[in-house]
Structures are given as C-alpha cells and as structure tokens.
Amino acid sequence: MSDLLKITDLAVDFDTTYGKLHAVRGVSIDIAEGESVGIVGESGSGKTVFSRATMGLLRGSSVHRTGQILFEGTEISSLDSKQIREYWGTKIAMIFQDPMTALNPVRRIGAQMSESLIKRLGMSKSEAKDRAIELLTLVKLPEPELALEKYAHQLSGGMRQRVMIAMAIACNPKMLFADEPTTALDVTVQAQVLELLADLRKELGMAMVIITHDLGVVAGYTDRIAVMYGGEIVELASTTDLFTDTKMPYTEALIKSIPRVDRKRGSELSSIEGMPPDPTSNRASCGFADRCPYAVQKCRDEHPQLVDAGNGHSYRCFFPIGGK
Ligand SMILES: Nc1ncnc2c1ncn2[C@@H]1O[C@H](COP(=O)(O)OP(=O)(O)OP(=O)(O)O)[C@@H](O)[C@H]1O
Ligand SMILES: [Mg+2]
C-alpha cells in the first residue's frame, strides 16, 4: 500500500485572548490508500483541528500552521482556491461533527445534494437527481426519492448522518474523514452507521479516518489507532497491538473506561480523573503526568518524545507499561 496522506510535524496554533493556544503540537502520521485509521482522544485533544487542517479548512490570520501535509505528494497549502475546491470531495471528503449544522435547515435534502453535484461534477438537473437517488440508495436510506423532498429536521439522526455520508462520497473521494460520525446517535444506530462506513470503504476503496472520543466505538472498524492527548499523538499502533501491547498509561485508562458485557457484576467502570492539560501552556512535562497513576518526578520535569517501538508502534512515555 502506498501512502496517500503524509503528515509531518503538523502544528496548529490559534491567537486567542488568553494568548497562543496550541491545538495541535507536532503530529506526524502517514495514511495509506484504502487504510482505516481511528483517531481517539477526549474533548479538546485536537482531533477536529487536526482533521480540518488536513482538509485545508483552517485559514485566516489568527491561525498558524506549520509542518507538512502532503496528499499524493502535494502540499495542500500550495493549492489555490480552485484547486482546493477540487481537492475537497474528489481527493478528500469530510463528514462534520454535527450533521444538523452541516446541513442547511431551510433547503430540501434533494436541492442540497443536487447543487453540489451540478457545481462539482457539471451534471444536469436530472442527472444530479438520479445520482442523488443512487447515492442515498448506496447509504441504505429508506425511500430515497421521498427523502429528497424533506428538510433536515424531518429526518432522524441516523438518517441525517446517512445523508451526510452520501454527500461526502458523491465525488468518489480517495479518503474520508468522519469526525465523530456516531456521537449523536443511539447505540444501535451507531453500529449501523459504522457498518455502513466499513462497507463503503471496501466497496469504493477509500481510506478512512474515524475520529471519536470513544475507543470502544472504533476498535472493530480500524486497522490502526492514533491516540491523541493534549494536541499530540501519544500512542500509535495497529488496533490489535494497541489493545494487547498497550504502552501509554493514557491508552490503558481509555481501554479501562470501555463498557464491556463480560465485566463482572459490581466491578466499577473507571473514568479518567483530572483535567486535560492547558492548551496554552508550552508544556515542559508529560501532559498526562498530573493524572497518571505511574507518574514520577521525571514525568513532571521533562516532556517525553515519541519512542519508536518497532512494528509501526510508537508512544510518548518515559515508563511505558510492560517496559520498552
Ligand atoms: N477556531 C479556534 N480558535 C481558537 N481555539 C480553537 C479553535 N478551534 C479549536 N480551538 C481549540 O483547540 C483545541 C482543540 O480543539 P478540537 O475542536 O480539535 O478538539 P476535539 O478533540 O475535536 O474535541 P471534541 O471531542 O470536543 O470535538 C481546544 O482547546 C479548542 O478550544
Ligand atoms: Mg471535535
């Protein structure tokens, strides 16, 4: 598999009234064609900023981006506005965190879908309608023709998410970013949407990045998982290694907080105590030190670098679980 997306040392800072906010701090990750990668981390860890940066969506004078984002060898910040519009949809597409705000509330689903097909692919009105029905059928939306006449608020959460997915895959992207695609949905619908994404990935040969705060949700659907904490990747491994050879105490805490049906009755589900690190600090310690059950003085005095454990497994910890 060749690399489709190659991100090296990506950092994103925002100017805020509290000073510089370091949302993403030196993230490197390569994603291959057709691969499925999970990005997991708690609220504020930088998942959305990371994915929006990769989409080339963070522009403006208060945003400072450094590092490299190469998609098929092209740095995305070198694209002009026409090229970036082509990039969105055909190269890379994104399902945004909140489908209710991503869909226009006062326009029918059909009109919204057709508009982008007409604009992007130069289709005629009737071609666009046929393609919209085809796409809604592909995402297994019941009665697609009727759905075209509806407004976003007339659809259930799961249906809205299917419409979002249909719109995202309309131009056959090579990579799909799904930002918290199932958070707003109940558990059964969550599983259906993830199954759908997995099927589409196979069918269309897309690479997929699933972003979530819930490790349990993505475990069954990804080849690799990157755990983000305080703007950094703190552990990156194949999904199997992440669970069976966990190195980072934060990852261990995430795994312990996954509800499991085989958990003994009465045994407690652990939550991760404490607060995430201050995003404005320059951080001279491990960002997890204050919350880590194994932390020693060194963890409070130095910031750990990423350690390569081989086999595509890396982690950011002085005292990894199970040793180096
Ligand atoms: N436009 C912005 N201006 C200033 N700060 C921002 C901006 N967007 C995000 N941030 C900050 O960057 C940090 C990372 O935010 P991000 O939205 O990426 O987190 P997240 O991991 O996606 O969280 P969630 O799980 O809640 O969606 C947070 O501290 C957030 O407040
Ligand atoms: Mg987010």
Image (cartoon, grey):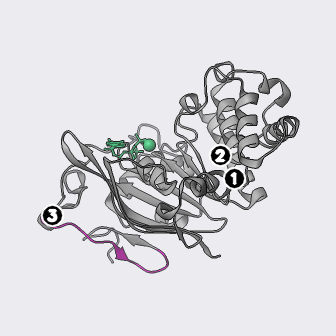
Name the N-terminal-most of marks 3 and 1. Answer: 1
**Residue underneath mark 1:** 198
Q: Position of residue 4 (x, y in %)?
A: 60, 69
Residue drawn at 38 percent across, 62 percent down: 233
Mark 3: secondary structure: loop
Where disc 1 sits, the SS reads helix
Residue 323 vertical position relative to residue 118 in the rendered view, above or below:
below
**Region rendered in magenta:** 300-312
The answer to which image quadrant residue 313 occupies is bottom left
Expressed as whole percent of the image width and height from the top left, the position of residue 82 reads: 60, 54
Indicate the amino acid at tag 2: Leu
* Residue 315 seen: yes
* Marks 1 & 2, CB-CB < 8 Å contact: yes
Mark 2 CB within 8 Å of ligand 1: no
| Circle 3 residue | 296
Is residue 15 highlighted in magenta? no
The three-letter amino acid code for the residue at tag 1 is: Ala
Going from N to C along the chain, the mark reached first, 3 or 2, is 2
Residue 37 position in % (x across, y down): 56, 60
Q: Nearer the viewer, residue 28 or 37?
A: 28
Give the foreground label among 3 and 1: 1
Q: Nearer the viewer, mark 3 or mark 2?
A: 2
Q: Quadrant of the N terminus?
A: bottom right
Ligand 1 within 8 Å of disc 3? The answer is: no
Task: Give the residue displayed 32% in from the left and 45% down from the top.
Answer: 272
Please tell me whether mark 2 sits on a helix, a strand or a loop. helix
The structure residue drawn at horizontal position 52% and vertical position 54%, both measured from the top left corner, is: 55
Gap in Å between the C-alphas at discs 1 and 2?
6 Å
Q: How many marks?
A: 3
Residue 259 placement, left or right of 60: right
